[in-house]
């Protein structure tokens, strides 16, 4: 089988566009279906200075996704190669697929004095806490459990077994909220995105 060649973008962007004074690694996590993707997409569209890490995954690409923008899509063999090469800051298995954060681009970004935003699952957030104790861990919470269930089931992109796994995982993740530095309740995408962007600025004190 042909090996997928993955290269990571080390572009650092324009420092003058970052309103902060120094680097900050912000990790956004929370239960599946809480709306992390919508918040991230809102930020991607409206706050071009925010640098988002692009994860590597073995999950099949969804029709609205773009390879290299939403994720780097690879097969398991390539993912294993990247694990063995020490390329990941963290990685985890979620609902049968592998996900990992490429280390190099995040480190380069922080070394250049700029903030970075990761959107990862709970297992990944815990690994980042170990690897980078200065990271700010942000928990995106649903307004209620009923609302979360409605969002998970109404999403329409996954089969029943995947939804069951996601509900189970979501309950586990809700219980982890006290491990996080900050909770943002996702009442609206606009409000949650604004709160998250506020945290990317290093002057913000939340710890
Ligand atoms: P999805 O398949 O719906 O895009 O993502 C499933 C879960 O994997 C989400 O909770 C998402 O935040 C998480 N995820 C995405 N990228 C990474 C990553 O690089 N590392 C870890 N640990 N989780 C990730």
Image (spheres, helix red, strand yellow):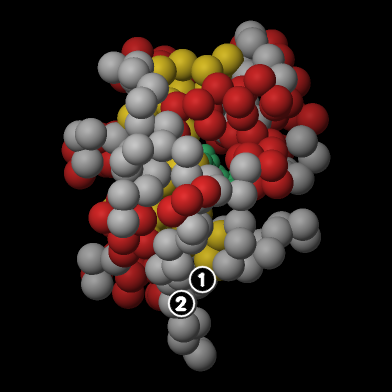
Disc 2 element:
loop
- Which label number is shown at residue 74? 1
- State the image coordinates of residue 100 (x, y, percent, origin top left): 40, 55
The residue located at (47%, 38%) in the rendering is 19
The residue located at (35%, 56%) in the rendering is 109
- State the image coordinates of residue 202 (x, y, percent, origin top left): 35, 31
Disc 1 element:
loop
- State the image coordinates of residue 86 (x, y, percent, origin top left): 23, 66
The residue located at (61%, 57%) in the rendering is 70
Q: Nearer the viewer, residue 159 or 57?
A: 57
Q: Say how many tags the image has.
A: 2
Q: Is residue 116 visible?
A: yes
Q: Nearer the viewer, residue 164 or 115?
A: 115
> If you read the primary sequence from the N terminus, does the residue marked by circle 1 or circle 2 appear first?
2
- Which label number is shown at residue 6? 2
- State the image coordinates of residue 172 (x, y, percent, origin top left): 44, 23
197 shown above or below 180: below
Kindly indicate the quadrant of the structure image that contains residue 83: bottom left
Neighbour class for label 2 at 10 Å: few (<14), some, many (≥20)?
Answer: some
Q: Nearer the viewer, residue 17 or 135?
A: 17
Kindly indicate the quadrant of the structure image that contains residue 42: top right
108 shown above or below 127: below
Answer whether labels 1 and 2 touch (C-beta < 8 Å): yes
160 shown above or below 88: above
Tell us which disc is closer to us: 1 or 2.
Answer: 2
- Under 8 Å from ligand 1: the CB of mark 2? no
50 shown above or below 184: below
């Amino acid at each position: 089988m042909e090996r997928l060649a993955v290269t990571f973008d080390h572009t650092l962007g324009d420092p003058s566009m970052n309103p902060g004074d120094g680097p900050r690694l912000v990790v956004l996590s929370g239960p599946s279906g809480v709306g992390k993707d919508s918040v991230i997409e809102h930020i991607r569209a409206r706050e071009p200075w925010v640098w988002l890490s692009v994860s590597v995954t073995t999950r099949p690409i969804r029709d609205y996704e773009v390879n290299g923008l939403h994720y780097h899509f690879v097969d398991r063999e390539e993912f294993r190669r990247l694990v063995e090469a020490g390329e990941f800051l963290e990685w985890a298995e979620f609902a049968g697929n592998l996900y990992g954060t490429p280390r190099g681009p995040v480190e380069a970004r922080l070394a250049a004095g700029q903030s970075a935003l990761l959107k990862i699952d709970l297992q990944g957030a815990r690994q980042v806490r170990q690897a980078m104790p200065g990271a700010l861990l942000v928990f995106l919470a649903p307004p209620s459990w009923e609302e979360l269930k409605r969002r998970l089931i109404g999403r329409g992109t996954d089969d029943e077994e995947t939804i069951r796994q996601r509900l189970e995982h979501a309950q586990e993740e809700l219980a982890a909220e006290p491990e996080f530095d900050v909770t943002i309740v996702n009442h609206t995408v606009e409000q949650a995105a604004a709160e998250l962007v506020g945290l990317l600025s290093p002057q913000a004190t939340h710890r």
